[in-house]
Image (tube, rainbow, N blue to C red):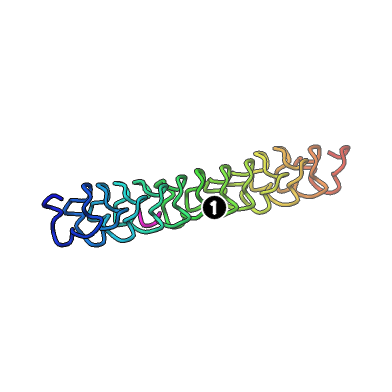
Amino acid sequence: MVNSCCGSLCSEQGCGQESCCQPTCCQPRCFQTTCCRTTCCQPSCCVPSCCRPQCCQSVCCQPSCCRPSCCISSCCRPQCCRPSCCISSCCRPQCCRPSCCISSCCRPQCCQPCCCRPICCISSCCRPQCCQPCCCRPSCCISSCCQPTCCETTCCRNTCCRPSCCISSCCRPQCCQPTCCISSCCRPSCCVSSCCRPQCCISSCCQPSCSSASCC
């Protein structure tokens, strides 16, 4: 052993290896065989939770990363070594991004490329078409409905989620019919069951008595 390894603390078994004969490695808690390597001989690495093979990486020898849940191959990377990312549900490759490593996003259903933002971290919203600020709610998670004006309970249905229906006067149950959701019919005066026909949707004709083709 070299001089730096010949102290009283460095004479225990497992410290005679060449890669461990450094002053920073001469600590009792670093005398484990799994910790006697060059990348592990740093002050921040010589802690009990960090002395294991998968933690002996330069990017992982940080105080915030030296915990059991962080010492896995997918977590030991620079962008993942932070306290908020060192939880079991967040230590996976697709979660190790700056936008993912926040307390509200480190959960299993959020570890998708499209979903790493707080507003999208609900189980029903982790889909590509739903990860928009206006769309993160269960009723709006369809591609044709992800518009601010369409994200209302009465609007988010298959028959109503189309561009021509995403206006305030048309987002009501009685207007969400195939014959109602057209540009000439989406107005308050046309939202009656007997008036949802193209030929009846004119200002002078939208009333029950005008619901026939010959009346408009």
User: Which secondary structure lies at badge 1?
Assistant: helix
Q: Nearer the viewer, residue 165 or 68?
A: 68
Q: Nearer the viewer, residue 71 or 13?
A: 13
In this picture, which residue range is highlighted in magenta? 81-86
Q: Residue 88, how many percent across, how many down? A: 46, 56
Residue 210 vs 11, above or below: the answer is above
Q: Residue 183, how many percent across, how many down? A: 70, 37
Q: Is residue 112 left or right of residue 215?
A: left
The amino acid beneath tag 1 is: Gln
Q: Residue 209, how many percent across, how many down? A: 86, 47
Q: Which residue is mark 1?
A: 109
Q: Residue 140, how many percent across, how many down? A: 62, 49
Residue 182 vs 80, above or below: the answer is above
Q: Residue at x 43, y 57 (%)?
A: 87
Q: Nearer the viewer, residue 52 or 192?
A: 52
Q: Is residue 216 left or right of residue 7?
A: right
Residue 12 vs 177, above or below: the answer is below
Number of residues whose C-alpha sits closer than 10 Å to that of mark 1, classed few (under 14), some (14–19) or many (20 or more): some
Q: Residue at x 81, y 49 (%)?
A: 193
Q: Residue at x 58, y 42 (%)?
A: 129
